[in-house]
Amino acid sequence: MSARTVPHRAGAAALSERAQAMVEMAVVVPVLVVLALIVYNLGVFVAATARFDRVAPDIVLARAVSAGEGEGEPADIVRSALAEAMEGFDVEVEVTEEIEEGEGPAGALISLVAPLRTYRCVMRYAPWPSHFSIAGVEARVPAFLSHERAVTVDVWHSGVVG
């Protein structure tokens, strides 16, 4: 063997290792970017959920119970107040009101008592990026994360929340 062939083989092996590292990096980087986006979206959702769970009972107590005549439906008042409280988080808020009917026979005294009201507050978060374009082809993420908080209020006992 001549002295020239040994360095040539060593150089080829080093070049082969660098090329292999380049291919591995090209495969790993997109996976790391996707994982980073998942962690980011999960962090934003957890922070939004924490705020939503903290403000929903307070807003229901303050706005729904004290809603007077002519101000609109209590569920709409709560929805707009929750949407305002959740500014900064790109979330959609939906509120429905359920009224529990009395269990006594019609005409009984129990039917005169105001029923309990349950407000179901739902927050929906669409992950970022929810739509993107690659080479002119539009793509959308169809999934979203959802969180629900039900707050039951007794209108006759101030501050009672279930």
Image (cartoon, rainbow, N blue to C red):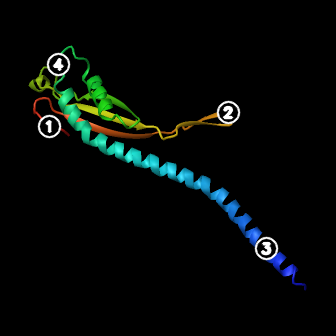
Q: Residue 154: x, y in percent?
A: 15, 32
Question: Residue at image x 79%, y 73%?
Answer: 11
- The residue where tag 1 is placed is 160
Q: Which of marks 2 and 4 is in front?
A: 2
- Amino acid of disc 1: Val
Residue type indicated by callout 4: Gly
**Residue, far front:** 4
Q: Which of marks 2 and 4 is nearer the N terminus?
A: 4
158 left or right of 116? left
Cα–Cα span, label 2 and label 4: 52 Å
Question: In the displayed structure, does residue 95 sit left or right of residue 115?
Answer: right
The secondary structure type at the circle numbered 2 is loop
Q: In which quarter of the image is the N terminus?
A: bottom right
The mark tally for this picture is: 4
Which residue: 26% across, 20% down?
73
Q: Nearer the viewer, mark 1 or mark 2?
A: 2
Determine the CA span between mark 1 and mark 4: 19 Å
Q: Alpha-carbon neighbours of circle 1 within 10 Å: few (<14), some, or many (≥20)? A: few
Which of the labelled discs sits on residue 68, or is there none?
4
